[in-house]
């Protein structure tokens, strides 16, 4: 079939009626959710961190092998509060990658700190000791290291660097909840780690987040800060905000947690379906998960290499027209975005080479193995007809 008779971009019916997205959107069982919530409902104590939040914090601390878990209203405020509590006094710069989550710079700005963008490693797409080290100045307040979407950043190298330089190190571990590093679950590395339970993430709490740490003092400070700065004697003693997790979200998160192994099995099936089928498609390299350690297999990331003949933006448009909600990987990088606050750009050589090359494919609960067959078939089709599609595209404008 010719592209103009098949593709939705040229006016045909989209292959999917309902969008297939890159969000996870796993819902736990309703019964489980309600059973976690029941005691709260009966107790009539429904605000400010009651026994369900204690249970939540205990379960998640245990799971991550961390001394403390502090539940918060979402991932963003978890990061803001942790940076606020950890940052080195009288210093104003936060080291972070540019090729990362689109809100990360705003998070630093909320604490009135200046993002200092550093490079990422071209293989792992994450921070390493080497890429972060060049951005350290006398003014560095903290290193903020988000794990990339697939696999992990250089945990050991960054811990060494932070120790040598006397700098706080915070991992944004939203994308690596389930991962192991050297046989140890993510959650107790560096000074603290932050997680999100937004519905699009691995653990769905409808909303919500939490922080894990082994640092007693930090945990205490985070609890006050989260609770409007109110101490255990009910005095407003500190600078704070209301950043509680509600019992509703805790119940949802706990119910999701109970079904995690099942989710990972399904993610694996989807990942290996992509892997098998993409082997026959020119121009796309699937970014693989480390097999020697635990991984969630949630995200499907591909690199468009020299044999992929369509520009990424046109590739995205063609697929999105079919209701395949594909996304460019962390695009544009943070250093290319206009902000209302100052930023500092370090050496971004790898970032500039990588920024146009990656794309996320549909994944999560609403994508089945047959959908993946269709998605890969379309990928193969558009690359095979790339020259012709580009000529059609030209005459369209
Ligand atoms: C989603 C996300 C966050 C923010 O979490 P919210 O709960 O949505 O505020 C932070 N970091 C990364 C890497 C994320 O993907």
Image (tube, helix red, strand yellow):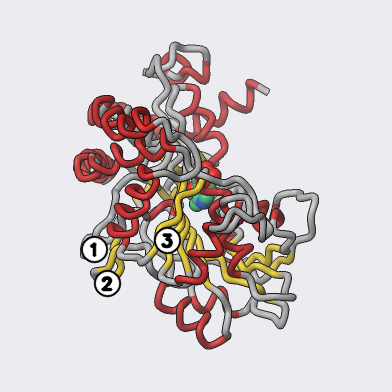
Residue pushed farthest front? Answer: 233
Which of the two discs, 3 and 2, labels the residue nearer the N terminus?
2
Residue sitting nearer the eye, 277 or 88:
88
Residue 99 in view, yes or no: no
Q: Measuring 65% from the left and 71% from the top, which residue is drawn there?
A: 347
Q: Are marks 2 and 1 in contact (CB under 8 Å)?
A: yes
Instruction: Assess disc 2: are there few (<14), some (14-19) or many (≥20) residues with their C-alpha within 10 Å of its C-alpha.
Output: few
Residue 324 at x, y = what percent? 43, 27
Residue annotated with mark 1: 293
Q: Which mark is residue 212?
A: 3
Q: Measuring 44% from the left and 22% from the top, which residue is drawn there?
A: 322
Query: Gap in Å between the C-alphas at discs 3 and 2?
Result: 18 Å
Which of the two discs, 2 and 1, labels the residue nearer the N terminus?
2
- Front: mark 3 or 1: 3
Residue sitting nearer the eye, 308 or 328:
328
Callout 1 secondary element: loop
Question: In this rendering, is residue 53 above or below 185?
Answer: above
Q: Measuring 74% from the left and 75% from the top, which residue is drawn there?
A: 90
In the shown orientation, is residue 144 left or right of residue 139?
left
In the shown orientation, is residue 79 left or right of residue 112?
left
Query: Gap in Å between the C-alphas at discs 2 and 1?
Result: 7 Å
Residue annotated with mark 2: 182
Query: Gap in Å between the C-alphas at discs 3 and 1?
Result: 21 Å
């Amino acid at each position: 079939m010719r592209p103009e008779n098949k593709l939705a971009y040229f006016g045909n019916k989209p292959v999917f009626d309902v969008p297939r997205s890159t969000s996870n959107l796993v819902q736990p069982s309703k019964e489980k959710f309600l059973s976690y919530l029941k005691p709260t409902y009966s107790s009539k104590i429904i605000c400010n961190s009651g026994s369900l939040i204690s249970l939540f914090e205990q379960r998640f601390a245990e799971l991550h092998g961390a001394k403390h878990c502090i539940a918060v209203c979402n991932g963003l405020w978890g990061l803001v509060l942790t940076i606020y509590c950890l940052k080195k006094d009288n210093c104003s710069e936060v080291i972070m990658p540019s090729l990362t989550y689109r809100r990360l710079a705003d998070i630093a700005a909320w604490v009135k700190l200046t993002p200092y963008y550093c490079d990422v490693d071209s293989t792992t797409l994450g921070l390493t000791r080497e890429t972060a080290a060049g951005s350290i100045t006398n003014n560095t307040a903290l290193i903020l290291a988000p794990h990339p979407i697939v696999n992990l950043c250089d945990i050991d190298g960054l811990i060494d660097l932070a120790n040598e330089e006397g700098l706080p190190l915070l991992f944004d571990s939203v994308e690596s909840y389930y991962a192991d590093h050297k046989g140890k679950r993510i959650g107790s590395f560096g000074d603290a780690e932050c997680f999100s339970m937004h519905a699009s993430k691995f653990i769905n709490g409808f909303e919500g987040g939490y922080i894990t740490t082994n640092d007693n003092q930090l945990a205490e400070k985070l609890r006050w800060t989260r609770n409007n700065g109110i101490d255990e004697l009910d005095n407003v003693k500190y600078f704070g905000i209301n950043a509680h997790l509600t019992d509703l979200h805790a119940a949802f998160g706990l119910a999701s947690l109970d079904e995690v192994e099942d989710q990972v099995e399904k993610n694996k099936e989807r990942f290996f379906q992509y892997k098998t089928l993409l082997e026959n498609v020119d121009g796309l390299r699937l970014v693989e998960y480390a097999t020697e350690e635990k991984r969630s297999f949630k995200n499907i990331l591909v690199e468009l290499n020299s044999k992929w003949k369509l520009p990424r933006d046109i590739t995205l448009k063609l697929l999105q027209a079919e209701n395949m909600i594909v996304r460019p990987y962390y695009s544009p990088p943070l250093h290319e975005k206009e902000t209302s606050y100052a930023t500092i750009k370090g050496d971004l050589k790898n970032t500039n080479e990588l920024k146009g090359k990656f794309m996320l494919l549909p994944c999560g609960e609403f994508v089945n193995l047959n959908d993946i067959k269709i998605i890969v078939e379309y990928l193969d089709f558009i690359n095979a007809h790339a020259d012709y599609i580009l000529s059609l595209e030209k005459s369209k404008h």
